Every structure is written in structure tokens, then in C-alpha cells.
Image (tube, rainbow, N blue to C red):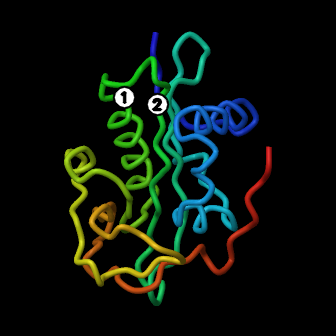
Amino acid sequence: MLEIIAENPDQHADAIEALYDKTFGPGHFAKTAERLRETSASLPEINRVAVRDGQLVGACRVWPITVGDGSVSALFIGPVAIDPDFQGQRLGLSVTGEALEAATKAGWDAAIIIGSSTYFGELGFEAVAKDRFQFPGPQDMSRVMVRDLAGSAADLSGYITAPRAAMPRATH
């Protein structure tokens, strides 16, 4: 039986990191998106994991970010990873969709994701103008998308950073 549940860091953190390494390889730490995550802490109550028969097979982590003046509460979605044995079953959309639903219920205004517009467009993400955001490193802006949650993404623009009051990410 497959379940999608909130992340329990004590049970899932090591398995999530192993899944990211298996799915993306060691080079994923060099990506610009990692600059936003390395000085922040994800939100386990919003993160979602897919578990089948006790084995973690998918994950979507969510991170608070500051965009521009910070007047709109925003989340950075990802990475989304699915075990290769379970890919092609729309499980990435399921774990991401459930994380977005939890974020909306928690009152977050908007979300940003980097990925395929064909894939994540199914969840309501829309591509943005190439000059709308600035990242802490090089970024293919054609892969950057936004989505409304409990508020509006319309006023999101500017430099994207980890929250000013972010706690350092725990290492596992």
C-alpha cells in the first residue's frame, strides 16, 4: 500500500537524502537551488513523502524563502524525487500536490518551483518573465514557475534568499 504523509524527520531524513543522491547524483549540491536550502530548514509539517510497505519511494521538501521585500510569504518547492522504480506513475505530482495543499492550509501565500512547465503546470504553476526573479547564482529562468497558494503570487518579484531569520539546516 502506498501512502503520502508528512515527513517525520526522525524516521525519514536519512532516507530522503539517500533518495536525492540516488535520483540526482552528487552534483545536485552544486545547483543554485541548493544555495537557498543550505542555510535554511525545510518544513516537515508541509513536506510530503511517499511510503510503500515501509520504504520511502518519493519526497517533496518545501522551504521558506524571502522574495524581494518579503511582503508576500513564499515557499520554495523541491527537490521532488521519486525512486526510479516508481517513476512514470505521476507520484511526483501526487507528493508535490499534497505538499502544496498543506502549504495552502497553513496560510502561505505563494510557491516557486524550478522544473518542467509541462509537468508542474498540471499543478497550477505558471512560467514567469525572465527578469522577475534573481537567484543567488546562475539559473535557467525558463524553468522558474510560480503558483498562488492561500494568497497571490502576483506581487512576488526580486531577489530570492533564504529567510533572514532562518535556522541552519540540520545535518543527518
Q: Quadrant of residue 152?
A: bottom left
| 1 or 2: mark nearer the eye | 2
Type of residue at label 1? Leu
Type of residue at label 2? Ile
Label 2 sits on a secondary structure element that is strand
Q: Earlier in the sequence, mark 1 or mark 2?
A: 2
Residue positioned most to the bottom:
69
Quadrant position of the C terminus in the picture: top right
What's the CA distance linking mark 1 and mark 2? 7 Å
Q: Nearer the viewer, residue 28 or 44?
A: 28
Disc assigned to residue 91: 1
Q: Nearer the viewer, residue 41 or 115?
A: 115
Q: Quadrant of residue 148?
A: bottom left
Label 1 sits on a secondary structure element that is helix
Residue at screen point 20% across, 45% down = 122
Give x and y (percent) for residue 60: 49, 42
Give x and y (percent) for residue 157: 35, 83
Q: Are marks 1 and 2 in contact (CB under 8 Å)?
A: yes
Q: Is residue 10 above or below residue 116?
A: above
Q: Is residue 49 above or below residue 52?
A: below
Residue denoted by label 2: 82
Give x and y (percent) for residue 164: 64, 81
Disc assigned to residue 162: none
Give x and y (percent) for residue 124: 21, 53
Total labels: the figure holds: 2
Residue at screen point 72% across, 30% down = 11
Q: Left or right of 34: which side holds 88?
A: left
Q: Residues within 10 Å of mark 1 (few under 14, many from 20)?
A: many
